[in-house]
Image (cartoon, rainbow, N blue to C red):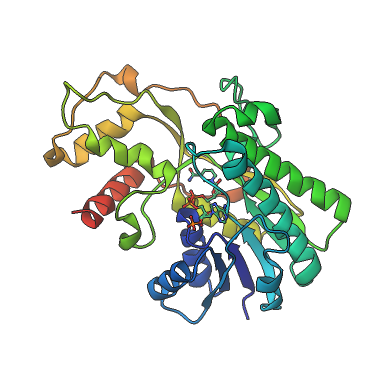
Amino acid sequence: MAATVFVSGASGFIAQHVIKQLLEKGYSVVGSVRSESKGENLKKNFDTDELSYEVVEDLETVGAFDSALKKHPDVTIFIHTASPVAFQVNDNEKDIIIPAINGTVNVLQAIKTSAPKVKKVIITSSIVTQLQIDDLSQTATEDTWSNISYDRAKEDGYAAYFGSKAFAEKAGIEFVKSEKPNFTLSTIHPVYVFGPQVFDSEAKGSLNLSNTFVSRLLELKSESDSQVPNTSGSFVDVRDVAAAHIIEIEKPSNGLRVITSNDVFTSQKLLNIINKNFPDLNLIKGDTSPSAEDTKSNVDDTKSREYLGLDYIGLEESVVQTVKQYLVANK
Ligand code: NAP
């Protein structure tokens, strides 16, 4: 019988792909969500008895995950995806940094106390824990660590997100070092994640933050009053990120930092892909010279690439599928 996996933040963009791939491989899944309506929505969409859910309203409350885990003594693997993913909030510390750190510690403490059968914990971390926020030209690898300070993290929402992921990961590693629990801890470090939602209905309205890098370009209708954002970064498709979580479950590793990254993008490159594949949208053209697509990668994922052995989904395929679904869901 395949194992039972607990997935926190089960209503999220990446988590739903993780759940889909787990179910396809015969695992049973228990997901945590913040409300019953989100749980019922998941049940309706996945439509299988192999998925159940628990409501954990507040990631940060001490003991938040204890009763959910006690109800599922068969859980042997825990995938922690839940964390605030936002750059614009009222209070950077309260809304982003603290929930990320305390959520991670609460999850690990609950597993130690209430889920003795759990042998592997995988946290969806981020490339931002390997980058230097104030010098993004430094290359991130599996062995680099963000040196962001708590005060710097509080300065703005972008920094708060960087800090939240870095402090949460470090808190997790510290927990394992000091508490010596019965499980190993691995972290998956995606770069910007694009790609379709598992279910078309989830693409209605606003998308998860990383996909808005694509969807906001669909508003660029007039050269006179819109401008292509000056954004660039590294990209990976959500299905490859989910696959990396499953690979890490199944490999006999003792805890690793695994990067998921495939290509680089500029907003102009994304716009060029959209214009090529969806000419009827009549979006602005921007700067179509080849140099406007150029950007240097600051990620070296050589070790992870070899470890995962994935045949990555390309940027064009990912963007086209994201846009196609968004247009259908919002027509
Ligand atoms: P998402 O769709 O916004 O998912 C975030 C999940 O976390 C949702 O289930 C959300 O619940 C939950 N959550 C957020 N704040 C919470 C809180 N205070 N208490 C309880 N639950 C909370 O974003 P995603 O892109 O799938 O991100 C999933 C994970 O991947 C995050 O840890 C993120 O840092 C990491 N990651 C994402 C990217 C990316 O480009 N997308 C890149 C690197 C790392 P609700 O559904 O109820 O809001």
Q: How many marks?
A: 0
Whole-percent x, y for residue 163 in the image: 64, 35
- The image quadrant of residue 269 is top left
Quadrant of the drawing holding the C terminus: bottom left
Quadrant of the drawing holding the N terminus: bottom right
Residue 69 seen by the camera: yes
Q: Residue at x 28, y 45 (%)?
A: 320
Q: Residue at x 50, y 66 (%)?
A: 35
Horizontal placement of 176 versus 39: left or right?
Answer: right
Horizontal placement of 73 versus 140: left or right?
Answer: right
Whole-percent x, y for residue 43 in the image: 44, 74
Q: Is residue 32 above or below residue 229?
A: below
Q: Residue at x 57, y 37 (%)?
A: 92
**Residue 45 or 76: which is nearer the viewer?**
45
Whole-percent x, y for residue 130 in the image: 64, 33
Residue 259 seen by the camera: no
